Image (cartoon, grey):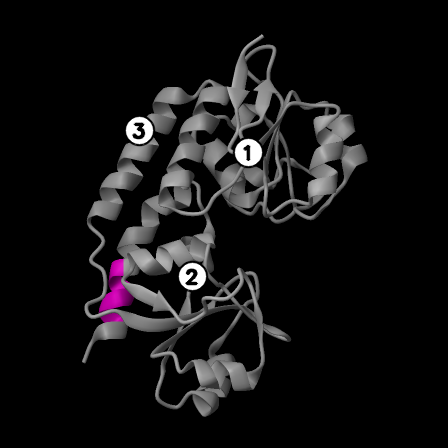
């Protein structure tokens, strides 16, 4: 029986090339379709929205942190693709009792590329995965970081305000852009208005997800941070670590140009 190792260094045994795959991570769901595994994906979460024309016909098995275990049993998967951060540990541990579960653990671009390579291996899509890794790596070579470094705060939630802190994938993307994250304590700390003001970011980035920040929120923050540049950004291009990374460097370059223009 073939043995593969996930990013938790856990052995995952599969009897053959998986034919019934469930993905419980949106960015990895999109990756599976990019790798041409359309006919083998039998279940996804309600948050798996890409590719829209294909996921709409796939069975839904709850949310990333509230999986419907019974629905998963009904689909009889021979492989489940999960993530350490995005899924609840207790639910993943329950699924491991019944199925091969491959768990990703993503911190930065190298671990994202490693995930793509290994998902390609366990699903029998090695060549397509290797091609994708090369394309993403080449695209990131074209990224032109901001000079000089800009002090940035990246908010992901409102009521309470929450920011992307250090040791997050978002933080690693900010660093590649030449941004200095003003939030160094904690992964996703809650912040008060006073703490946001005291951090004095040069730039405030408001993510489109998981909280859908909008123009009206820019107006609110302009009162708090009158000297900061405030920008709505595409959260998927900062936080999705699958095939969507193909498009991140081009987007980042345009964003950097806009935010550093005199």
Left or right: 218 in relation to 161: left
Q: Quadrant of the N terminus?
A: top right
Q: Quadrant of residue 58?
A: top right
Q: Which residues are magenta?
A: 253-258
Left or right: 171 in relation to 44: left
How many discs mark residues in the rendered view?
3
- Name the residue tied to disc 1: 8
Residue pictured at 18% horizontal, 80% vertical: 262
Q: Quadrant of residue 23?
A: top right
Using the image, tell me which numbered label, if any, was put on residue 131.
3
Give above or below for 157 relative to 68: below
Q: Residues within 10 Å of mark 1 (few under 14, many from 20)?
A: few
Q: Residue 97: x, y in percent?
A: 75, 25
Residue mark closest to the camera, 1 vs 3: 1
Label 3: which secondary element: helix
| Residue 126 colored in magenta in the image | no
- Name the residue tied to disc 2: 234
């Amino acid at each position: 029986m073939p043995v593969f190792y996930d990013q938790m260094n856990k052995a995952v045994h599969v009897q053959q090339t998986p034919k019934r795959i469930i993905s419980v991570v949106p960015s990895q769901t999109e990756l599976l379709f990019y790798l041409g595994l359309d006919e083998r994906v039998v279940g996804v979460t309600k948050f798996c929205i890409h590719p829209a024309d294909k996921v709409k016909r796939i069975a839904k098995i709850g949310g990333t942190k509230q999986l419907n275990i019974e629905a998963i049993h009904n689909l009889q998967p021979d492989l489940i693709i999960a993530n350490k951060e995005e899924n609840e540990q207790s639910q993943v541990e329950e699924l491991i009792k019944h199925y091969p579960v491959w768990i990703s653990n993503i911190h930065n671009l190298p671990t994202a590329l490693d995930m793509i390579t290994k998902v390609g291996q366990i699903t029998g899509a090695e060549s397509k995965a290797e091609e994708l890794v090369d394309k993403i790596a080449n695209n990131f070579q074209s990224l032109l970081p901001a000079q000089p470094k800009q002090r940035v705060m990246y908010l992901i939630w409102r009521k309470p305000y929450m920011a992307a802190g250090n040791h997050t994938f978002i933080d690693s993307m900010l660093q590649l852009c030449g941004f200095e994250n003003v939030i160094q304590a904690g992964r996703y700390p809650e912040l008060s208005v006073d703490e946001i003001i005291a951090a004095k970011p040069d730039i405030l980035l408001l993510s489109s997800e998981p909280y859908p920040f909008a123009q009206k929120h820019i107006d609110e923050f302009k009162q708090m941070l009158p000297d900061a540049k405030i920008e709505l950004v595409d959260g998927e291009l900062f936080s999705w670590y699958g095939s969507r990374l193909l498009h991140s460097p081009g987007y980042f370059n345009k964003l950097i140009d806009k935010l550093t223009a005199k």
